[in-house]
Image (spheres, helix red, strand yellow):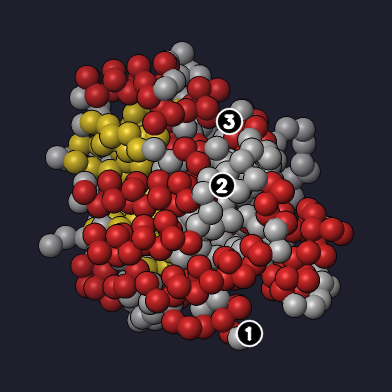
Amino acid sequence: MSAVELNLDGIVGPTHNYAGLSWGNLASARNKDAVARPRAAALQGIAKARALMALGVPQGVLPPQERPNIAFLRSVGFSGDDRAIWDAAWRTAPDLARAASAASSMWAANAATVSPAFDCADARTHITTANLNTMLHRALEAESTARALARVFPDAARFALHPPLLGQSAFADEGAANHMRLCAEHGAPGIELFVYGRSAGEQAGVGFPGRQTREAFEAIARRHQLAPARVIFVRQSKRAIDAGAFHNDVVAVANERALFFHEHAFEDKAATLDEIRRKADGLFDPIFIEVRESAVSLGDAVTSYLFNSQLITQGGRPYLIAPTEVRENNAAAGHVRDLVESGALGGVAYVEVRESMRNGGGPACLRLRVALSQADLAAAAQGFLLTETVADALEDWIARTYRETLAPEDLADPALVAETQRALDELTAILPLGGDFYGFQRDG
Ligand code: SUG
């Protein structure tokens, strides 16, 4: 059997909440201080993964991280037992406490950048954990993400796991959310597109920040041993960033030969498409599905998250897994209907991930794609792969241990620390994490 694309979904953690932490992410700002529903959020995530599994996509999961992040608060000078630290942080440094509460590791598209073995000179799968340097709450993810990826891909002969790039603004890196791969099929050599928002030396101007630097992606392309003839660095349009597309995956998505993108996704569209055509020559014929501003405005693209759909292949054609918000947006829904009627898309399925969407995370944000040969898939730690049995166990665990609601004032609840630690401890018996994955387990 040929290669597959494993999708690793980030399990939504028990402290899922709306803190308005992400400047430039309109949904995060709009929903600041809304009451979150952690249980529903996590169940929506599992349901989405199940839907992909039913469409034949192999699914796996990445564990939620330890939040509240007591180790971080200790590192910035809080002391005492966990409960005392949590209490003091809320009283004296609520911004740090908020950053230490974010369940943002659910957005696995930001976990790492993955170059499949088929593109890399040493024929190993190369993975660089993202430093997520731009936002404090997200920068806290990198260490635990690297630990999780090492558990899922333990075999160094097949998987080259690289540490995050230097955590400095010049190397700000947000992972696969800004990375696209085009190829004849998952197991064939591909063209890797690295979409950046700014260069290291640029002064921040007006408008929203570019979170990804070109220099970070150049470093990753070197680390991953990619052939320059198969790599393209593309500047994301400032217009898209300022409209709220804080990652490229809010305005473009690729799968196999197909690139589905908004007219204003890239700073220089013509040059980008030309370079793709040139570099794909002899490998495959790219399929460009461009959405014009006149059909779906950037504003509607950002509100509906049309391009944050997952794009897969079904019956040889591009098939969209879109958030239900697309169906609720007249322009986006109408355009998808047209694309299906014209045959450009083989079909569309809608999934409900509303809790994540309200923080700016659609279906595509929730998963990390790893194209693998069958032998490499077999070398991954099988216990992280989703089966109906594992999905049942996760749903049962979520239903038993997650709160139904979490309002901003609930986060300061001193009971939250022990409660979330108990829940995560239980998870280490469902996924093969062992008794030492989380800091609170290592500290006893
Ligand atoms: O980094 N939201 C995330 C959403 C990430 C979406 N990922 C992709 N597009 N791939 C972010 O802005 C909001 C958290 C809060 O405000 O509580 C947040 O981190």
Measured in 3D between alpha carbons, the distance from the residue under mark 2 to the one under mark 3, in whole angstroms, is 33 Å
Residue at 55% from the left image edge and 76% from the top image edge: 438
Q: Amino acid at mark 3?
A: Ala
Query: 95 or 164, which lies in front?
Result: 95
Q: What residue is pinned by disc 2?
A: 405
Label of residue 240 in the image: 3
Dot 2 falls on a residue whose secondary structure is loop
Q: Are marks 3 and 1 in contact (CB under 8 Å)?
A: no
Closer to the chain start, of discs 2 and 3, is: 3
Q: Residues within 10 Å of mark 1 (few under 14, many from 20)?
A: few
Query: 240 or 325, which lies in front?
Result: 325
Q: Is residue 312 visible?
A: yes
Up the image or down, 438 lies above or below 289; here it is: below
Check the image and name the residue furthest to the top.
294
> Where is residue 197, by image quadrant?
top right
Query: 77 or 36, which lies in front?
Result: 36
Up the image or down, 351 lies above or below 56; here it is: above
Up the image or down, 141 lies above or below 213; here it is: below
Q: What residue is pinned by disc 1?
A: 443
> Where is residue 378, by image quadrant?
bottom left
Does mark 2 have its CB less than 8 Å from ligand 1? no
Measured in 3D between alpha carbons, the distance from the residue under mark 1 to the one under mark 2, in whole angstroms, is 29 Å
Dot 1 falls on a residue whose secondary structure is loop
Q: Is residue 110 visible?
A: no
Q: Amino acid at mark 2?
A: Thr
Percent across and percent down for residue 48 are 34, 46
| Residue 17 placement, left or right of 408 | left
